[in-house]
Amino acid sequence: MSQSHQQPALPKCPGCEEPPAAGDLFCGVCGYDLSAVPARPDDRPTMAITVPPAAPAAPAAPAAGAVRWPAAEEADSSDVPAPVVRPADVPGTDSGGRPLTGPDTPDAVPGRGAASPPEPVRAGGPEAAAVQVRHDDRAGPGGAEASGDFALAAPDPRAAEHAAASAAPAPGAQVCVACRSGRVDADGYCENCGHAQPRERDHMEQELDAVAAVSDRGLRHHRNEDSFAVSSTALPDGSPAVVAIVCDGVSSASRPDEASAAAASAANEALLESLPRGTHPQTAMHEAIVAASEAVNALAQEPAGAREHDTHRHQNAPACTLVGAIMAGGLLIVGWVGDSRVYWVPEDRTRPTARLTEDDSWAAQMVAAGLMNEAEAYADERAHAITGWLGADAYELEPHTAAFKPDRPGLVVVCTDGLWNYAESAEEMAAAVPADAQRQPLHAAQALVGHALDGGGHDNVTVALLPFAVRPQGAGSACDTV
């Protein structure tokens, strides 16, 4: 396991000014790389460079171009030489209220009164003159550049919009979402302000005629390690079949985002190939989970060095969980490995709701063995330790599948624990689902993701909704196992 140096706690994120959580390497709101923010010296507080205070009596006006500045002290109380300040460093007025002029300041700055607050120091050459920076240290003579003074990695995005035209990216290049002027490098960071750019997977949405899905990074993770695939096809008799696959990367494994993406894609492709051939949907689901497992296993077989940029991650095999649902021929087929879930929410909310999957987790095992009740098990810190997953280091693969035949219209909710942690029971999930979910599944999926984010968003959040439309066929339970 690679070691990481603990970063000092920051009162505010430099990118969005929201307070980060202790120990976070990335801002949970904007994704700013907090590890790039230098630590403040304990005994060198930020010093504002200001013009000298007005003298009791106004001195005689100096000759043109001959503004006199006080000589810098040799050292301050921390034994660090004080900076040498030139007239060009601090635009403003002299003690008599006149614009400062001199050999190094050809352009006077009119209209600045003596009571104006000090302007930010401008560091660097003409190209950087329009970008505001702050010096948080003081060093030897020779100015900021020679003294080792540093500028923050990312200037205030609100001020960066005034950056010089020379910093603008080339036509067609990706523009930074923070400073709106810098070019985004291949590593996903702005060359101008260093701000991490939102990744494509940070928030994803997809809607088909009979299914919709939304995935979000959440508020705490620096990337989205969930993935999903939704699709539709036709059975041999021409009737429709709708598919939803949701995968959750195991964060303690290496490349969990790649594992979830590979599993979702492989399972979806397997179903689109087998269902039109007439394979029974439950058999097709089992085969799709096996195909997803093989796709994740293949990631661990890449040659050494193929992922040099991931050397800071644990080197155990990529892994993820999977849950899926198929609506075909009046049946609802679910399949899963891990702790992602499927819920049934009837359109008539007076009818009973149900959870259609059982977690592969420590808590579920304790409940099944009768050692704890559900409340005790899920309150334990070991509750979410999974006992089944897809990956080369998994134990014997045991895909779970089940078939149901709903006798009334309802909504199928396929989700990761990033959602059900905030609506764990079937009743809580039904209460969180909007009333118009049957007619507007995408809007309902967005609302459910918002429910998780409002609850804290401590994990990636992914949900797929499949409206199940049937005619009522009499009384009975919401779901009858086939």
Image (spheres, rainbow, N blue to C red):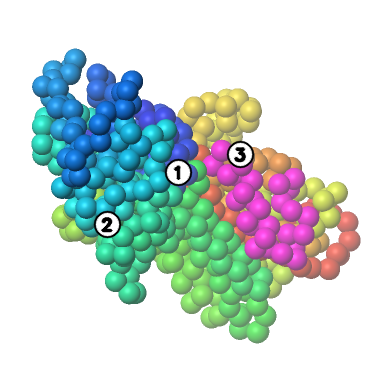
Q: Mark 3 against mark 2, which lies toward the viewer?
A: 2
Residue, disc 1: 16
- Label 3: how many Cα within 10 Å (few below 14, some 14–19, many 20+): few
Residue, disc 3: 455
Q: Residue at x 55, y 80 (%)?
A: 276
Q: Residue at x 69, y 73 (%)?
A: 329
Q: Residue at x 31, y 60 (%)?
A: 164
Label 1 residue SS: loop
Q: Earlier in the sequence, mark 3 or mark 2?
A: 2
Q: Is residue 354 left or right of residue 38?
A: right
Tell me the amino acid under the disc marked 1. Answer: Cys
Tell me the amino acid under the disc marked 3. Answer: Gly
**Residue 191, numbered circle:** 2
Question: Is residue 361 shown above or below 176?
Answer: above
Query: Marks 3 and 2, how far apart in space?
Result: 35 Å
Query: Marks 3 and 1, how far apart in space?
Result: 21 Å
* Residue 48 pos. (x, y %): 31, 30
Q: Is residue 423 left or right of residue 383?
A: right
Question: Is residue 230 shown above or below 388?
Answer: below
Residues in magenta?
Answer: 430-457
Quadrant of the rendered image containing residue 148 = top left
